[in-house]
Amino acid sequence: EDQVTQSPEALRLQEGESSSLNCSYTVSGLRGLFWYRQDPGKGPEFLFTLYSAGEEKEKERLKATLTKKESFLHITAPKPEDSATYLCAVDATGGTSYGKLTFGQGTILTVHP
Amino acid sequence: DAMVIQNPRYQVTQFGKPVTLSCSQTLNHNVMYWYQQKSSQAPKLLFHYYDKDFNNEADTPDNFQSRRPNTSFCFLDIRSPGLGDAAMYLCATSRERVAGGQAKNIQYFGAGTRLSVL
């Protein structure tokens, strides 16, 4: 069974204090790993997708990296508006023409001014 | 802007009273998904449509049904809501993968419908 574990469950940072969120996964065959941001009471917003170990993607203060067992979401000099829940999901559905995502429980990030 | 739209944003129903949630999309994606997300939990896939083909997850209760009358619309029907069905319901869409290409099956989500059961 595919499993996704995110850590920490919650992270409090001061504005400008860089840190990383972790996503560990156990799947039979990874088709893609996805990072989403979810604000309270809203649907997940797509951030990044990574397909192979060693791949990196960047967007503003966020950088996602991927190894064979885990992914990191690095947040550089965060601002209060980066406060949200960050969800990691994997697509391990080989042989199909569409993806089914298995989500982790998320990391709740709070950035204080 | 092309998007995934869910209606209503908030729905209150009574215990046992059928309720229908709506999702529409302007992305022309052929795959549509319904997820249930309870407070502080991961979204849980209930079922999905690949075009008109319906695919139910093994642990989705029989109380949950879905309809997809056309490419743009998909509905979630809860036949007899219980207190445990109170949750956020998320609709998502994606394209099918391109044969031989990298899996670009990014799922795009709507804002969700918050269901309360009294």
Image (cartoon, coloured by chain):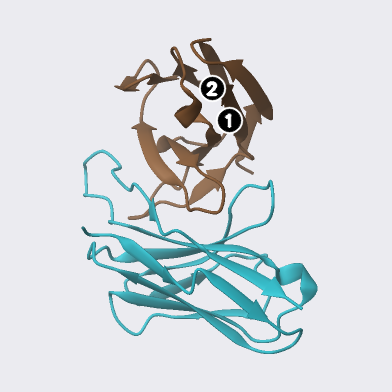
Chain colours: A brown, B cyan
**Which mark is drawn over residue A107?**
none
From this view, report whether residue B69 is shown above or below residue A36. below
| Corner quadrant of residue B28 | bottom left
**N-terminal label among 1 and 2:** 1
Q: In this view, does B20 lie to the left or right of A46?
A: right
Instruction: Check the residue under mark 2 and report the chain it is in.
Output: A
Q: Which of B28 and A47 is in front in this view?
A: A47
Q: Name the residue under label 2.
A: A70
Identity of the residue drawn at 32% across and 48% down: B105
From this view, report whether residue B41 is shown above or below residue A104. below
Identity of the residue drawn at 62% across and 33% down: A108
Q: Can residue A67 be seen in this view?
A: no
Amino acid type assigned to the residue bearing label 2 in the image: Glu
Residue A3 pos. (x, y %): 63, 38
On-image quarter of the N terminus of chain A? top right
**Which mark is drawn over residue A25?**
1
Q: Is mark 1 on a helix, strand or loop?
A: strand
Q: Is residue B84 visible?
A: yes
